[in-house]
Amino acid sequence: MPNAPCPIPISIKNLHHYFGHGKLRKQVLFNINLEINSGEIIIMTGPSGSGKTTLLTLVGGLRSAQAGSLRILDRELCGASPRELLAARRHNGYIFQAHNLHGSLTVLQNVKMGLELHQQIELPEILMRSAQILEQVGLGHCLHYYPDQLSGGQKQRVAIARALVSHPPIVLADEPTAALDSQSGRDVVNLMQKLAKEQGCTILMVTHDNRILDIADRIVHLEDGKLKPKIKTQQSIVNSQ
Ligand SMILES: Nc1ncnc2c1ncn2[C@@H]1O[C@H](COP(=O)(O)OP(=O)(O)OP(=O)(O)O)[C@@H](O)[C@H]1O
């Protein structure tokens, strides 16, 4: 498993990002500097269009970094080749607003996919670990259900199990509670927090959901593509929105 200890798994220095070309070229991230320590849960807030998803996808190797330095698990992603980005993506777990489960696969098969990229693990072990993590997220009785048979909160718990089954050193989450009612949203983030602390993984989460800010070790705020130099307290973020 790719679990080599790295004290600062995410190190971003002087990062700029642009969309478009020529006259349509538009800068969306300006001189981002951020270090995230191993095991930290960081929540990123900010108004719509401030660049949160762009930054998250850059960290995840889902798009190419153009200028500055973006070191993820001691690998430089700025200027990385598509092959290097692909390799970097394998060390991350992803949780999105839409759970992105495959409707034609059972819960167990969906979670199993989170381990299939790790070819050195044999099938019986894959099945055992998948069932185990589904037990941990409270869905041990739903292994052979299809996503359609689950509630929104249960689907998101399957997505968490899939993201964490390989014990990734980094988990990236984009609005994981946006589609959930308040109790399911709370359950889902509590679960993420518990599993992350047990596994020692680092979480970078984008959210507009003020109700879950308390799970963060640190909150950072993006506005107009700029990271606020001062890290805000949870209460001041709530007050400013
Ligand atoms: N593929 C793209 N091509 C061109 N512009 C883009 C692209 N993706 C995002 N943008 C622009 O970049 C800026 C930042 O977008 P981004 O999605 O990162 O913001 P966000 O803070 O995540 O917003 P939200 O909270 O609404 O999801 C916006 O002005 C958006 O229009």
Image (cartoon, grey):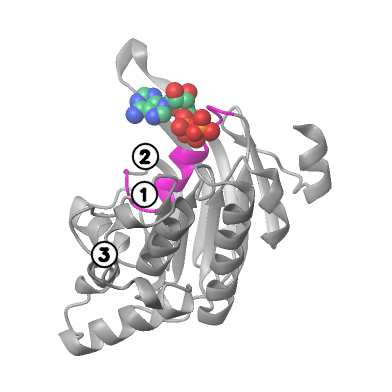
Q: From the viewer's perspective, is the residue at label 3 or at label 1 nearer? A: 3
Badge 3, how many Cα within 10 Å: few under 14, some, many 20+?
many
Please give the name of the residue rendered at 34% of the width and 78% of the height, measured from the top-left corner: 2
Q: From the viewer's perspective, is the residue at label 2 or at label 3 nearer? A: 3
Q: What residue type is labelled 2?
A: Gln
| Earlier residue among tags 3 and 1 | 1
Of the numbered discs in the image, which one, if any, rests on residue 103?
Answer: none
Badge 1, how many Cα within 10 Å: few under 14, some, many 20+?
many
Q: Position of residue 122 (x, y in %)?
A: 17, 87
The quadrant where residue 117 appears: bottom left
Q: Where is residue 135 in the image (x, y as percent from the top left)?
A: 43, 80
Spatial CA distance of label 3 from label 1 is: 32 Å
Q: Which of 241 and 188 is in front in this view?
A: 188
Q: Where is residue 119 in the image (x, y as percent from the top left)?
A: 16, 78
Quarter that holds the C terminus: top right
Image vertical order of residue 127 relative to residue 201, above or below: below
Magenta residue check for 61:
yes
Report the span colored magenta: 48-63
Of the numbered discs in the image, which one, if any, rests on residue 66?
Answer: 2
Q: Is residue 19 visible?
A: no
Q: Are the residues flagged by discs 2 and 1 in contact, CB closer than 8 Å?
A: yes
Image vertical order of residue 89 relative to residue 234, above or below: below
| Earlier residue among tags 2 and 1 | 2
Q: Which of 108 and 59 is in front in this view?
A: 108
Q: Which amino acid does label 3 sit on?
A: Asn
Spatial CA distance of label 2 from label 3 is: 34 Å
Q: Position of residue 64 (x, y in %)?
A: 32, 44
Q: In which quarter of the image is ligand 1?
A: top left
Residue on which disc 1 sits: 78
Of the numbered discs in the image, which one, if any, rests on residue 110?
Answer: 3
